[in-house]
Amino acid sequence: MPWWELIGWLGSVLVVLSLMVPSVRRFRILNLTGSLIATVYNAAFQIWPYAAMNGAIVLINIYWLWRLQKQTTPAGRAYLVAPVGTDDALVTHFVERHQDDIRSTHPRFDPAALTRGSAWITMHEDEVIGLFALSPVREGTATVLLDYVTARFRDYGTGRHLYAKHDLVAQQGITRLRIEADTTADPGYFRRLGFTELDGALEKRP
């Protein structure tokens, strides 16, 4: 099979794969990549109707990725962050239900560590979509044990809403949040939310 035909197939595969991804942001990125490849491929062979269609899809994906990046809360969504006991049945059930996905996003997360810290749930309407947990505060510093949201809501909107709630950490006497870089599968998420790298960790001052 010629190399240029492989490139065409790659674009098609990425578009199809994007339709199987529950995360809105990842869907847009995969769909954008596949559509961009398809645009170049069709333009190279002067298949203009398909080149134009895929070019339009590229622009649409760029627009919505920009919207996801800029919005604090995606259109139509309202979030509630509420404190919960780390030993509450709700927390235990949520962690057990999503344990495989939590392990993929926070490879070193230990559920037993929850009992020694503080936790909050994130809700959208009547659905629990996330769990945020911190270690006990030491000299004003708390370690992020878990910052997890379900795949369908995994964009920067929930994180911006969470970290914009200054009262959430101020009431705990926290002056600095910290997470070890190797405890998260996506350090870029924390960097985009204002964390900076320092001594192998990511830190943020609320």
Image (cartoon, rainbow, N blue to C red):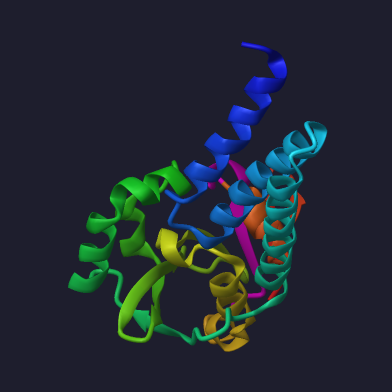
Q: Which residue lies furthest to the top in this view?
A: 1
Looking at the rendered structure, the number of numbered marks drawn on it comes to: 0
Q: Which image quarter is the C terminus in? A: bottom right
Quarter-wise, where is residue 131 in the image?
A: bottom left
Q: Give the range drawn in magenta.
A: 174-185
Residue located at (50% from left, 62% from top): 154
Residue located at (66% from left, 50% from top): 32
Residue 106 in view: no
Residue located at (26% from left, 64% from top): 94
Where does residue 21 sit, x and y in percent of width and height? Answer: 45, 51
182 lies left or right of 33: left
Which one is nearer the viewer's eye here, 22 or 181? 22
Residue 178 in view: yes
Residue 47 belongs to the span the image colors magenta: no
- In the rendered view, would you say 154 is above or below 111? below
Where does residue 130 sit, x and y in percent of width and height? Answer: 40, 69
- In the rendered view, would you say 2 is above or below 205? above
Where does residue 13 sit, x and y in percent of width and height? Answer: 53, 35
Quarter-wise, where is residue 202 in the image?
A: bottom right
54 lies left or right of 124: right
Where does residue 80 sit, x and y in percent of width and height? Answer: 44, 86
Residue 177 belongs to the span the image colors magenta: yes
Residue located at (56% from left, 39% from top): 14
Q: Which image quarter is the N terminus in? A: top right
- In the rendered view, would you say 162 is above or below 14? below
